[in-house]
Image (tube, rainbow, N blue to C red):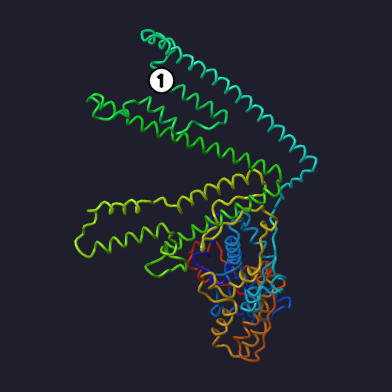
Amino acid sequence: MMTECVCNPISSRSKMAELLFETYGVPSIAFGVDAAFSYKFNQQHGICTEDGLAVCAGVTTSHVIPFIKGEPVLEACCRTNIGGYHVTDYLRQLLSLKYPYHMSSITWEKAEELKMEHCYVALDYASELEIFQKGKKEAEEKTRSWQLPWVPPPQEEAPSEEELARKAALKEKQGQRLRDMAAAKRSIRITELENELHGLKDLLQQLDQAEETEISSILSKTGYDSRQEIESATQKITQSLRKAKGEQNETEERIDASLAEKYPLTNVPDDMLTPEQLKEKRKQMFLKTTSEGRLRAKQKRFEEESMREKQNQQEEEKRLENPELYLEQLHSRFRELTEKVEQRKRLKTNGARTNGNQNLSGGVGRGERLNAAQKERMRLLTTAAFDRGKGEDTFGARDEDWQLYKLMSKDNDDEENGQEEDEAELARVTSRLQDIDPTFVAKSDTVPLQGTPELPRFRPLTAEDFQIVIGVERFRCPEILFQPNMVGVDQAGLDEMAGVSFRRLSTVDDAVKDRISNSVLVTGGSSLFPGLVPRLEAGIRQIRPYLSPLKVVRASDPILDAWRGAATYAASLQFATQTFSMQDYYEKGEGWLRQHHIQYTL
């Protein structure tokens, strides 16, 4: 005895018969509709009558079969390819889209379990949606949560005051040790530089006292090629020694004097030099200019480093005097600099969005954010263009005309210099706050501009992040049994299929239709959803005429009643006369299966 759903394709029945006869050697088989067996089994127990309607919501299909005098009217049956499988798949898809980072936990088996435990059919789908949309208390009561496995991270205990004092003392001890090591290393370095400087000075004094014939032999012993090389080495060691001692470097006049001695031809007039000396003079001028640039750059870097060290030393003294006041002043300075840098960036961004005379962003335009120097240059350019455009263009004929280019070429004005200084100061203050304030969190950039979303900050995961909340999905997924178009299936729902079956019983009188509507049996695994029977009864009542009798009941066991009914039928004496034997299969072929029907009335 093989059960099948109504309107099953003949090809499926043929393949099953071929498998049973040719592979397993079954002597005879019979095919019957599972919903009909379930209806007949419940009829024997008095749950439904011989005239009625079987509504079966199965796994992959749902169908409606009317019964008259105990026999199914297959011409009036109706089928939809929607069942419990599609409800489970729809629930899994919704939860996977809602929680993509927990997709591996939302398996098919877990979705099936959640469907059977928590899903229900809403009596009024629109009203139920409105409850969850408005966030009423009733919606919170109907919401369910599924807690995924989660292990809280270990929490570190706050250190005690004794531990903090011990760490501070250890840190101070290590810092003092590093300072002592640095001082000793610096002292050794100063001693080595002084000894080397004394040696070079003695060598220069020896060269001054030696005769011209002895100079080459003295230089060969020392490894230097000329007196100028010794003087250059002396100058470098002197600068290194002053830097190690923390003293100021030599002045600009001293540098110029040294360069003048090194390059003597640069100060001699050209008319007093021979052609060979003029070539040498040009070479010395180039070398002197290059040396001056390098020396001035070194001097500037040294002064900046000295000033930075002095400033850090002063700030450290302030911090040691009053740490709380110093920290508060540093935070105030940080906020002030941040606001200035952000203001400049906002002005530039708003000005760049302007189009002609209309400011689309609502901010200031370029003309409103020019400083005094820029406005003066714009005035000069406009005046020159106006004056020179009246007649013949004679701009450049006079020397004062070229002063305009000098004014207009000042790209690095005070505002840009001030911006660079503010950004450098902001970076220094930020670095200082990171060193002394453990609670300070530096921004990766300034505050985002208007319209730019701020990136979310990282936070530790909690148990709520591992919860699957099921709210509207509880009744949205089973709703596809009544509205298959929600999942793209353009077919009728359960209540509409019942109306189609009634309309197909056009030759039946109204009295029989009333008896059929008074015995509607709901079977199948999907009929176990809470609220399905009242919803189906309300849907059929809207289809049936006014005051027509209507009774919708659920089967005693919607899942196993079909098997029990088939087992009862197979145990009867009539079953042997309803089967299709192997001999009939080989003689009549698969085409005879199209005409095979059993009689359900025993």
Q: Is residue 492 above or below residue 508?
A: above
Question: In this orientation, which residue lies closer to the viewer: 47 or 116?
Answer: 116
Q: Which residue is at a point 54% across and 28% down the rendered structure image?
A: 242
Q: Quadrant of residue 297?
A: top left
Q: Does any portion of residue 30 appear in the rendered image?
A: no
Question: In this orientation, which residue lies closer to the viewer: 21 or 311?
Answer: 311
Q: Is residue 364 above or below residue 121?
A: above
Q: Is residue 558 left or right of residue 354?
A: right
Secondary structure state at the residue bearing disc 1: helix
Picture coordinates of residue 208 (x, y %)?
42, 13
Picture coordinates of residue 363 (x, y %)?
47, 66
Task: Bin the neighbour count of mark 1 within 10 Å (Cα to Cα): few under 14, some 14-19, many 20 and up.
Answer: few
Q: Is residue 267 left or right of residue 418?
A: left
- Badge 1 is on which residue? 229
Instruction: Give the number of callouts.
Output: 1
Q: Quadrant of the N terminus?
A: bottom right
Q: Which residue is at a point 46% across and 67% down the rendered structure image?
A: 361
Q: Is residue 548 above or below residue 461?
A: below
Picture coordinates of residue 598 (x, y %)?
59, 72
Question: In this orientation, which residue lies closer to the viewer: 259 or 86?
Answer: 259
Picture coordinates of residue 199 (x, y %)?
50, 15
Q: Does any portion of residue 429 appear in the rendered image?
A: yes
Question: In this orientation, which residue lies closer to the viewer: 226 or 157?
Answer: 226
Q: Quadrant of the C terminus?
A: bottom right
Q: Amino acid at mark 1?
A: Glu
